Structure formats: C-alpha cells, structure tokens
C-alpha cells in the first residue's frame, strides 16, 4: 500500500494511505478500480458491485449496531473501504433502527445511502425490511430477513395491522430481485439467547454469497471484537445461519 | 487491546467519535472531561477504556460548564486537555467559554462539540458554530473519518500555537458514522503539570490567568485569531477538487462534503462542478476563498443547521467584490437548500439538478407504483419506553395521581428518555406538558407555582432524571424552596445516565474509568435545603400512588419524591428477569367490558402483545424484561408473575 | 331521549363523562367502579383514569344517571298493583323499631336496618351484606360483613355518599354467597339496572343479590365541602361518633368525643352534593324494603327511636313478617296522615328535582337522564315546574 507523508503546517505529519483523501485532488477520488490513488490497494476479494450499499435494519435492541460492526469489520479486514452510517440514542428506544454500510474498493462515501440505491437489505424484523425497501429499494435489490415479527405499539394497540408473512413474501417478490426469509430468532433462542439472531443473520448473509465474506473472515473479526468466552456460541450461530440459505 | 490503541500505520474502522478520541491520544492529551449527550458520548467512553494505559484523567463532570473548567485547569498547568459535549452543552459552558477565550490558554485545549442536525436524538437543532465567531476562537469541522482524527490532533497544536481554545465541531452523521482510518503514532512521553502564576499579568505563560486588562487582552485575542487565519490559508485540511473553470462552486464542510461529492457523482457533474471543502471554518481563510471564488460566478454553500458559512462567505465576498466580481449565491438563505433538518445526498442532488438543469436518475415507474402499493401497508413504529422501563411505571403513577386529584395539575418535563412522555404523549399516558433544556422543568414548575395569584391555581409537578438533577436542577430546586413554590418534584432515578449509555454521574459510586468515588445522595441534598422528601419504588404502584396523592393534597411547600428503580437496559439488569411473567388465558378478559385490553391498549409495554385470534394478551418472552408491573395493573389478576431465582 | 340512548352506544365512557360527570349528575354510588380498571372513586368523586373505547359498557348501563327504562325495571321488581307515583311500590307502610332497647341505643333511629340484616343473615337468606363504613379521613367505603358484630359496628348515618355499589362490584365474589345490600336510592337504582342489563360477565354476580334494604335519602354532602365546613367549625372528622338531623330544629347535630355540636342547617345545605338536587327518589323506590326516620307527633326522644318502613316486594314482606314473628322487630301501623306527609315530601323532592333539571338543561324537552314519557315523571311536569324553567 502506497503511503505519502503530508505536511500539515504545524507539528503533525499525517500519513495518507493509498486511498482518496480530502487533501488530494478530485481526480483521484473518482470511484472504481482505475482510481489513481487506490491503484496499489490490495483487496483479497471482489465486490459484485462497487460500491455495494447494504442496509441492516431492525428494531432498537435487536443487535443491529453489533451486526453492522461485525460485517464492516470483516470487509475492512478484506481491504475494502467501508463507511457505516447509523443513528442511536433515543431513536433506539423501541423504534426502527438502520445501519447503512457502503463498501468500496476506492472511495469514502456518504454515511447515508441515497434513496433507491440499496443493493442488499438485511432485516432483523420483516416490516422493517419493507420500510427500508420502500425508501431505498430498486429492481435489483436483494433482501434477507428474519421472519420473527416485533409488533409496533400501534399494532399492539390495534390502531394498525401487521401484514402476514405471506403478504410480506409477496411484497418482497414485487420489490426485490432476490429474497430470503429465515427464522433466525428461533435458531438463536435454541442457542440460548435471542440476541444471537443478528449473528445468525450474518451467517445467512455469508450463505447468500452476495458479499465476499466467509466463516474464516468472521472468525478473524470476532477474535478482535468479541470477548473470547463468546467466540464459540457466535461461531455456532454463524454456522446455523449459513446453513439456512 | 482496545482498537483505539492500534499501532501506527494500521488501518482500522473507527466511528467518527473514536477517530476524534484517537486524534486526541496522538496529540498526547492528558485530561478529558465532558457531560454525556448524543451524539458526543463515545469520545469520552472510548478514552475512559484506555485511560489507565495512556495515563489519562477522564471525568464525566456534573455539567458542561464544570467540564470545561476542569479541562481548562489542565491547560493552565501546561497539559493538553479536551472537553466533549453535545450542541446544547456549549450553551451551558458558554459563560466560562467567553472568559476562557479572553484569558487565553496554555497547554493545547480543544472543545469538541457534536451537533445533531435533524435532531435525531435531541429536542433541538442547536447550532454552536456561532459561538466561535461570537467568542472569537478558531473553529474546525472534519469532513471524513480520517480527517476527524487528523484534525483533532492538529487542533491541539493550533491551540498551543495561538494560546487559545479551539472548537472542533462534529455532527451526528460524522460522530456516529464509521469509516477507515489509518492510525498515526501515539506519543511515548507524558507531560507533567506545572502552574506558574507569579509573572506579569501580560505574560501568557507565567502570569495569572485572567482576562484583564480587558481591552488589551481582547486585542491580543483578535491577533490570535488572525494567526489562526494565516495557518488556515495554507492548511491542507482545506482543499479544492474539481475542474479549473467550474460552472458552479460548492463550498461545504463536515458531512455535507460527502453528500455534495456523492451528489456531483450521481448527476455526473464532475467536469462542471467544483467543491471547495473547508475544514477550517472560522476565521475564514480569505485569500484561499478569494482564489476559488474567482473561478466562477455561481456559488452554492452546502451546510447543516444555520447558514453560518454562507453568511460569513457572503460578508467576505462583499469585501473582495472588486477583485472577484458579482456572484450568485445558492444555499439556505435563498431556500435552494432547506433551512431546517439534516441534509443527505438526495437533497443536494435536488438542489444541484435545479441549478445545473440536469435530471437525476429515477426508479422505473412500475417499481415506484409497487412501492406506493406497499407503503400504506407498513405499520409505523413509534418510539416507546422499553419493556421493564421504570419510566412507564412512574408516569402511570403520576398520571393516576393527577387524575385522582382532579385539578388538572401541570407536569413539567426534562431531558432524558422520559422526555418521550412529552414528545409522544400516549407513551407517558399524556402526562407531561413542557420540555426544554436540562433542569428547566423544575425552574418552570417553580414559576408556574407562583401563578395562583393570577388565577392559575393548579397542582404543579416537575420530573427530572438523576443525572439531570445534578446537572442543572439543583439551583432551580433551591429557587423553588426559597420562594415557597408549591410543587411536587419527582426524581426519576434510574441509576445512571441511561439515555446516552449509562455514564456515571455524581450519584454513582464510581468514576468514568471505574475507580471508586463517593456518591452524592439526592435525598440528602433535597432534605438539606429543607424540602419534604420521600423515596419510593415506581414498580410499587400502590405505595407510590399514596405518597403522590398525599403530596399533592399538601399545599404550600416543596415536596420531593425520589422514584428509584434502575433502567431495564442497565448493565446490572440487562438480560436478567426478576419475574417470569405469564398471562392466564382463562382469566384474561381481553377486549371484553371489564378490561378492554388495559395492558395492551393503555399500559403499552412492547412485551405485552395482543393475540388477535385468541383475543387474549400474550407476554413476548423474548423481549419481556420481567419487571412484573403488568401483574399489578391487570384487573383480573390474569397476569401472573413468579420470582426467578437469581 | 332517543338521541341520548344512541349516544350511549357511541362510547360508554365518554358518555358518562359528558352527560354525567361533567354535568354534575354523578351520585358517587360506585356502579361504574370496580367493574373495570378505568373508573375509580377517589374521596367521593368518580374519576376516569384512562380511556376506554367500548360502545356498550356496563359503566353507562349500570349508572343511575344514564337513561333507563323505568317501566321495565318496575315490572321486573314489583307487582303493578303496589305501585304509587309518589313513593314507588308499597305493600305495607309501618313504624318499626328493634325490640332490643340496647340495640336501639347504638343505632341511628329504630335499628330496623340492623334487625333485618341480622335476621336475613341468621336465617340464611343471605350469606353476607354490603354496608357502608367510614374511615379516618371521613371517607365512606363499602364493606362486606357476615356477622352481627360487624353489622353493628357500621350502623349510623354518615351523610356523605358511600360507593356501596363499587364495594358490591369489588367484594362480592363467588365465596360471598348470597348478598344483601344497604343502599341509598341511587344505589338501589344502580343495582336494579344491573339486574336488567346483566351481561355475561355480570350475570352470576347479580344473581347473588338477594336483598336490597333501601335508605330514605334527601341529599348527601360533598366530602370536600363538608370537611371544609367541619374544619371551619373546629370539628376533626376523626372525632365524630354520630350525627343526626333532629325533627324541627333546623340543625345538624354532631356528637363528638368532646360533646355535641350543632351546625345551622343552611350551612350544611350549602355542602350538599350537586347531583342530589337532580334526584327524584327520596325513598329508595327500587329496594325490597325502605327504611327512614320516623316523623310523628311526640317528643323527639320518642320519635327518634322509631323508623318508617316501606315494604315493597314479596321478599321484603316475608322478611319483615319473619322479624315480627321472631319478636326482633316491633311494628306499628302508621297513620294515614303519616303516609300522606311522606308522599307530599316525596312529591316535593320530585318537583324540585325536575325544576332543577329543567333549569340546568334550559328546556323542558331535555330532562337529562329522565324520560318525559315515564308516567312517574310526566305526572310531576306541572305548570309550576314549567314556569321555573328559565330564571
């Protein structure tokens, strides 16, 4: 990886990686493999689309943020430039949550995916998948969703109705090029903790081969980001997910 | 090893706030203080995790003003220090900030303020960049994750160079977004603190640290700003990318740079539109500005919240009119861009396509039709109190007491998760009526209580959280007690700064890095000022209700009720159920007269769902936190709870 | 009238709020309380805690101040030959008192209610009784009792309203068995409405109701106003042992630990609960028997020891006959003029109520919860009442 030393006119000497930076000219931040500044960048895999825009969605408390971090970590390890956009704080409390992941071989992208530009939607909750599709979907989008429903308060109180899983499936057929619906929560509950459903989903995502990620990449990432005592259960969850596709 | 301590030259995925924290570490920061607030909290959280290894003093201070004072002391003693807060915090700290910027500083000191355009996790869209202009200090705004780190480090150097504080402004989409960052070197030496003050009052490094003689020091302060402007002219953090003769020049900063760049690409305007990205936004580097303003007649300023850059650029352009000629400006002021709410790539695309007369790509019409068919079938998902949240029980109690009292009492709200009771009234049983800055609920209550003489004779209540209590409620409470304000003041003590992630506060017996500290008892403070105090468990509906109704009946004094119950997401509670909760279907009346779904329609715990086929309430075991409060409200005793052995 | 009935269908709870609570018609009987979690009684006020959206709830069906079908109620409970327009069904009208002088000494008047309740219990006609009691703060509460001692502890007039029907709703479980209730006119009406509008959930409970002993009632006092009055007079509610309104003296006598005190009647009247001025029933017309204080020529000490007793139903008659047969109740035939006096007083109350109702509604066509087609109402819609229409 080519590195250049840049003088910041104070004490700082800033190392620049072989990738675009704000301090370099615009011509070097065009996207794609011919990006001059990124020519030396080594990726150990290819994206089927560059950049790939991924949205991970769910309900506050389902482990959305953790899933996006693990997935992004795996991709960064593989040499990609990843931008994650997410919100948390009060917006997390029982509301819809969304992480935008943008994977590129050459460019830092906006932390918000533009409308209609998602490539992959991963949902820990079915209507959240639909909600994301209606804003970010396009005829080529692929969607992978957990079938476990978490009823919004308005549905519980009876002010709104929740579509059946069959209806959800039909809507996916209209709005996505590919779709998978899996019962990740049941698998996670069987493993002893419903929160593991996010890892089951990551395993399933690996199973779809939409992204250059596999078990080894997962193992490598969790070795860094998850306490050792929890490695085995997470690996089991990942494997269970991968098998569901 | 913490990711924050990754070796130099390694490339890691950092959240914007982590990049800022790493930048501070690379600058050799010694003291870090702040008050939690989304989207700023992770800067201090991450630093507290490496505090021991990096010889840092990390403090969650009582409020932002105190935090800035704590950081300033370190600067006076020659250390590098950083103070972190969200946009509102700058207002709290601003009184000291004015004086600090006048007295000047010694060791590098950076005020990191994270704003929340669109108020994703705030009750305001506060804009703090004007403080830099008003208080005459430099302002930096990183536009990428790498830059968040680099610019933070540079900010310390700049501060030390000009001997004044520097403000670094981030936004939610920077602080809470993540991206690749190549780490720099961490210093191996740590500074020692020395405070010398026996020199001349005019000696910035050896004299007393004061803002007098005011006029002379004010002049010096302005010179410092000019020095900063000089550095900004040549700073690589400001850059132009684009054609030599663009048809339109976008001037932008922060996350808006990423939106603008993406918008240009989406419209394929790379050869027609240039971007001047400014990361040093106050004082403006005027020569640099002049150079790029000359390139074209049309300028669009893309920024979030208020038109700070736009105003300053327009003023600067006026001063150089002869050299640059007349310009057409687009931005917030002419409504090309929305004047409120956050921006995103589409908004910039819309503005650009209008100016450049190009059409953005659109989805196939058939697909849009399908979206229009699906959209109405998606039930909205409003925020709500979590399963097991003590606030639900507390507001249940307060609402019941208000209704029983029957005089339509007024409840003033405050900042915390419980603010949701005023933002989405139905989740707090339509109880809270006002919501402003931290501590304001109690001040407002103190005022409302004095309006009886003018015909507003109603019971007055205020609620506040435990962290808020220490932050800004105490003066208001003393005001209420001293002025004999008849209020029932309720502390929703959930044992931590819950909304922002359980940062400790003065009521908790440990520090940011887990060292033992004495806790300051809220009840003792309230008793100390002479208020009548009671403590109750909000989950004890009957006991709490009795205290509340008796407090409301007692006229003429300040009454304090502390409702103690830890947040359901708190580390000590999370994943542990006190009770196994079940619904006995035989007994559940469902939607029949006699219950009509009290638990699922009114109590609104997300873990209590409604089985439409059976027409019975069901406990969602996966998300139930096991608080058991629903057992107490079920009129049929159809909800059973059994204690879980811990 | 028709319109009102339709509105009940719309949303029972809102109807109660709009047409009963907000109109000041709520008697505080407690019929809408303890049948669901939405209404409670606090002090003597009915409070709606949360919104219920049901359309045909028991709350409005049971409320004595929502429109009812009085003809159907009377048909269900009484023999048509016994019905009088002034005081409802009358099978017999007597002066009565407990045979036991000791019992009389502890009771308000002739202890007729105590005697009848005790007898009903001991004969197994009922297994328990719902009566009202008074707590420290002067608040009335209904309790369920099943022995002599408990009954005797709770005797005596309280003059504030008791949520007795709420106590019936809450305390009458399957285990309580057959139940008797001591009820004021509004409470007796609520219990009668429960019988007619019984729902699936309520059917078993209302079947347990075997006896209603009605109490004469001219008005009740608002707790808030009355406690304030007592405080003004330096009387602590806790110290009150007994209260009475002696005939012809125009005072309320209060017997406290520190001795007797008298409060001028007009001051007491200012504390009367709003709802009571719209009530047409002073003799508890929907009870099995109704009991009040006697009024006849003689010394007050003598009169005080007697009750008036109206026997209204077969069940009531059987119980009174048994009490007389067992020698626990002394009964005298009341003179005709006494009955006439009672009727005159009852008519007066009815007319006053109608006047007040018309004044409130502003139109003779709107009688609030009453139905002008009910002969017992129509009869008293006289010119004299009409003319009071607009003040």
Image: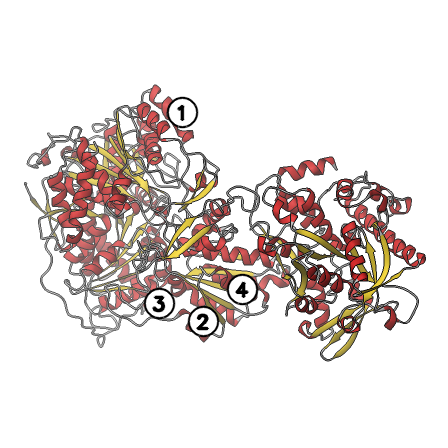
The residue furthest front is C325
Of mark 4 and mark 3, the one earlier in the sequence is 3
Left or right of residue B376: residue A88: left
Q: Quadrant of the N terminus of chain C?
A: top right
Instruction: Residue under label 4, please give it.
Output: B546
Spatial CA distance of label 1 from label 3 is 52 Å
State the residue position of label 2: B526
Element marked by disc 1: helix
Q: Nearer the viewer, mark 1 or mark 4?
A: 4
Could you tell me how far apart the alpha carbons at marks 4 and 3 are, in whole angstroms? 26 Å
In-front residue for pair C126/B596? C126
Residue under pointer 1: B373
**Residue A19 x/y as whole percent:** 12, 39
| Cα–Cα span, label 3 and label 2 | 13 Å
Where does residue B410 sit, x and y in percent of width and height? 55, 57
Name the image quarter holding residue B190: bottom left
What is the C-alpha distance between the residues marked 1 and 4?
Answer: 52 Å
Residue lying furthest bottom in this view?
C258
User: The residue marked by circle 2 belongs to what chain?
Assistant: B
The correct choice, above or below, for C316 with respect to B209 in the image is above
- Are the residues under badges 2 and 1 in a single subunit? yes
Question: Residue B41: percent from the left, percent from the top?
Answer: 29, 55
Task: Identify the mark at residue B507; answer none if there is no mark.
Answer: 3
In the image, residue C250 sits, relative to residue C256, either above or below, namely above
Q: Is residue A154 left or right of residue B519?
A: right
**Residue sitting at x 88%, y 63%:** C295
């Amino acid at each position: 990886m080519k590195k250049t030393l840049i003088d910041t006119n104070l004490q700082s000497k800033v190392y620049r990686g072989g990738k675009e930076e704000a301090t370099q000219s615009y011509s070097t931040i065009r996207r794609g493999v011919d990006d001059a500044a990124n020519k030396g960048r080594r990726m150990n895999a290819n994206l089927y689309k560059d950049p790939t825009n991924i949205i991970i969605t769910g309900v506050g408390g389902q482990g959305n943020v953790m899933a996006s971090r693990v997935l992004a970590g795996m991709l960064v390890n593989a040499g990609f430039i990843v931008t994650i956009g997410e919100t948390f704080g009060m917006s997390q409390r029982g509301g819809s949550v969304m992480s935008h992941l943008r994977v590129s071989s050459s460019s830092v992208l906006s932390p918000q995916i533009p409308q209609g530009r998602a490539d992959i939607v991963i949902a820990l909750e079915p209507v959240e998948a639909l909600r994301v599709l209606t804003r970010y979907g396009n005829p080529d989008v692929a969607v992978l969703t957990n079938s476990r429903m978490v009823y919004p308060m308005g549905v519980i109180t009876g002010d709104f109705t929740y579509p059946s899983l069959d209806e959800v499936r039909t809507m996916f057929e209209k709005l996505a090029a590919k779709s998978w619906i899996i019962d990740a929560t049941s698998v996670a509950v069987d493993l002893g903790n419903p929160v593991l459903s996010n890892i089951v989903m990551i395993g399933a995502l690996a199973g779809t081969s939409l992204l250059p990620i596999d078990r080894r990449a997962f193992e490598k990432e969790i070795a860094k980001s998850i306490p050792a005592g929890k490695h085995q259960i997470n690996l089991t969850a990942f494997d269970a997910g991968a098998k569901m596709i | 090893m913490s990711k924050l301590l990754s070796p130099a030259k390694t490339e890691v995925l950092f959240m914007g706030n982590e990049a800022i924290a790493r930048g501070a570490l690379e600058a050799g920061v010694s003291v870090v203080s702040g008050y939690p607030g989304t989207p700023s909290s992770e800067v201090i959280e991450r630093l507290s995790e490496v505090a021991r290894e990096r010889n840092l003093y990390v403090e969650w201070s009582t409020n932002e003003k105190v935090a800035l004072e704590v950081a300033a002391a370190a600067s006076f003693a020659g250390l590098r220090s950083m103070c972190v807060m969200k946009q509102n915090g700058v207002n709290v700290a601003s009184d000291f900030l004015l004086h600090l910027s006048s007295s000047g500083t010694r060791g590098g000191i950076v005020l990191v303020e994270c704003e929340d355009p669109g108020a994703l996790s705030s009750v305001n869209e506060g804009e703090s960049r004007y403080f830099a202009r008003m208080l005459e200090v430099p302002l930096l705004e990183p536009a990428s994750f790498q830059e968040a780190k680099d610019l933070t480090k540079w900010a310390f150097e700049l501060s030390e160079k000009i001997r004044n504080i520097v403000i670094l402004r981030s936004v939610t989409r920077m602080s809470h977004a993540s991206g690749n960052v190549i780490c720099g070197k961490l210093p191996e030496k740590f500074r020692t603190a020395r405070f010398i003050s026996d020199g001349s009052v005019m000696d910035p490094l050896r004299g007393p640290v004061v803002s007098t003689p005011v006029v002379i020091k004010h002049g010096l302060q302005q010179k410092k700003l000019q020095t900063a402007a000089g550095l900004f002219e040549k700073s690589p953090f400001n850059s132009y990318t684009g054609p030599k003769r663009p048809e339109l020049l976008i001037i932008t900063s922060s996350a808006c740079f990423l939106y603008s760049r993406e918008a240009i690409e989406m419209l394929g305007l790379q050869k027609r539109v240039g971007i001047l990205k400014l990361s040093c936004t106050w004082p403006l580097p005027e020569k640099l500005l002049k150079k790029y303003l000359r390139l074209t007649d049309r300028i669009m300023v893309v920024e979030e919240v208020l038109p700070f850059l736009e105003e300053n650029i327009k003023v600067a352009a006026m001063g150089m009119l002869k050299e640059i000629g007349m310009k057409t400006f687009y931005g917030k002021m002419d409504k090309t861009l929305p004047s409120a709410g956050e921006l995103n790539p589409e908004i910039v695309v819309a503005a650009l396509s209008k100016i450049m007369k190009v059409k953005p790509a659109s989805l196939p019409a058939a697909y849009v039709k399908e979206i229009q068919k699906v959209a109405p079938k998606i039930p909205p998902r409003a925020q709500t109190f979590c399963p097991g949240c003590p606030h639900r029980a507390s507001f249940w109690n307060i609402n019941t007491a208000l209704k029983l009292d029957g005089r339509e009492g007024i409840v003033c709200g405050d900042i915390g998760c419980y603010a949701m009771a005023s933002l989405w009234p139905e989740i707090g049983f339509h109880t809270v009526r006002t919501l402003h800055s931290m501590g304001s609920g109690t001040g407002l209550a103190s005022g409302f209580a004095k309006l009886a003489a003018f015909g507003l004779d109603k019971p007055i209540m205020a609620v506040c959280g435990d962290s808020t209590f220490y932050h800004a409620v105490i003066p208001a409470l003393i005001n209420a007690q001293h002025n004999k304000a008849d209020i029932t003041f309720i502390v929703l003590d959930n044992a931590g700064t819950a909304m922002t992630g359980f940062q400790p506060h003065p009521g908790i017996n440990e520090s940011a890095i887990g060292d033992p500290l004495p806790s300051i008892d809220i009840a003792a403070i309230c008793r100390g000022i002479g208020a009548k105090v009671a403590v109750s468990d909000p989950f004890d509906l009957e006991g709490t209700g009795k205290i509340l109704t008796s407090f409301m009946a007692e006229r003429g004094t300040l009454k304090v009720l502390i409702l103690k119950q830890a947040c359901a997401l708190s580390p000590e509670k999370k994943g542990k159920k006190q009770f196994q909760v079940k619904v006995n279907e035989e007994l559940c009346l469902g939607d029949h007269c006699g219950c009509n779904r009290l638990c699922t329609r009114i109590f609104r715990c997300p873990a209590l769902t409604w089985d439409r086929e059976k027409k019975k309430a069901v406990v969602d075991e996966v998300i139930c936190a096991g608080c058991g409060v629903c057992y107490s409200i079920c009129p049929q005793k159809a909800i059973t709870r059994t204690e879980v052995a811990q | 009238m028709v319109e009102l009935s339709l509105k009940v269908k719309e949303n029972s709870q809102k109807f109660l709020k709009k047409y009963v609570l907000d109109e000041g018609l709520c008697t505080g009987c407690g019929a809408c309380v303890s049948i669901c979690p939405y209404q409670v009684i606090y002090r003597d006020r009915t409070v709606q805690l949360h919104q219920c959206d049901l359309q045909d709830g028991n709350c409005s069906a049971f409320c004595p101040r929502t429109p009812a079908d009085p003809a159907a109620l009377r048909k269900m409970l009484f023999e048509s030959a016994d019905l009088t327009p002034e005081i409802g069904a009358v099978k017999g009208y007597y002066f009565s008192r407990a045979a036991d002088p000791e019992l009389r000494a502890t009771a308000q008047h002739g202890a007729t209610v105590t005697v009848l309740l005790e007898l009903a219990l001991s004969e197994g006609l009922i297994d328990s009784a719902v009566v009202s009691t008074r707590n420290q703060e002067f608040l009335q509460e209904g309790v369920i009792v099943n022995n002599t001692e408990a009954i005797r502890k709770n005797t005596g007039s309280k003059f504030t309203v008791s949520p007795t029907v709420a106590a019936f709703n809450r305390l009458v479980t399957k285990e309580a068995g057959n139940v008797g209730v001591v009820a004021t006119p509004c409470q007796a009406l609520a219990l009668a409405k429960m019988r007619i509008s019984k729902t699936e959930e309520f059917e078993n409970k209302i079947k347990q109701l075997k006896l209603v002993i009605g109490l004469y009632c001219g008005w009740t006092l608002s707790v808030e106003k009355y406690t304030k009055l007592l405080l003004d007079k330096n009387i602590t509610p806790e110290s009150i042992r007994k209260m009475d309104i002696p005939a012809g003296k125009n005072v309320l006598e209060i017997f406290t630990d520190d001795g007797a005190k008298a409060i001028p009647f007009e001051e007491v009247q200012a504390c009367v609960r709003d709802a009571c001025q719209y009530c047409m029933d002073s003799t508890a017309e929907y009870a099995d028997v109704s009991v009040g204080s006697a009024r006849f020529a003689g010394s007050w000490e003598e009169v005080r020891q007697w009750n008036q007793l109206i026997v209204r139903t077969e069940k009531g008659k059987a119980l009174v006959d048994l009490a007389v047969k067992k020698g626990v109740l002394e009964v005298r035939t009341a003179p005709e003029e006494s009955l006439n006096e009672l009727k005159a007083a009852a008519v007066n109350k009815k007319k006053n109520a109608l006047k007040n109702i018309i004044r409130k509604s502003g139109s003779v066509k709107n009688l609030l919860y009453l139905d002008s087609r009910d002969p017992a109402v129509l009869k008293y819609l006289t010119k004299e009442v009409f003319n009071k229409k607009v003040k």
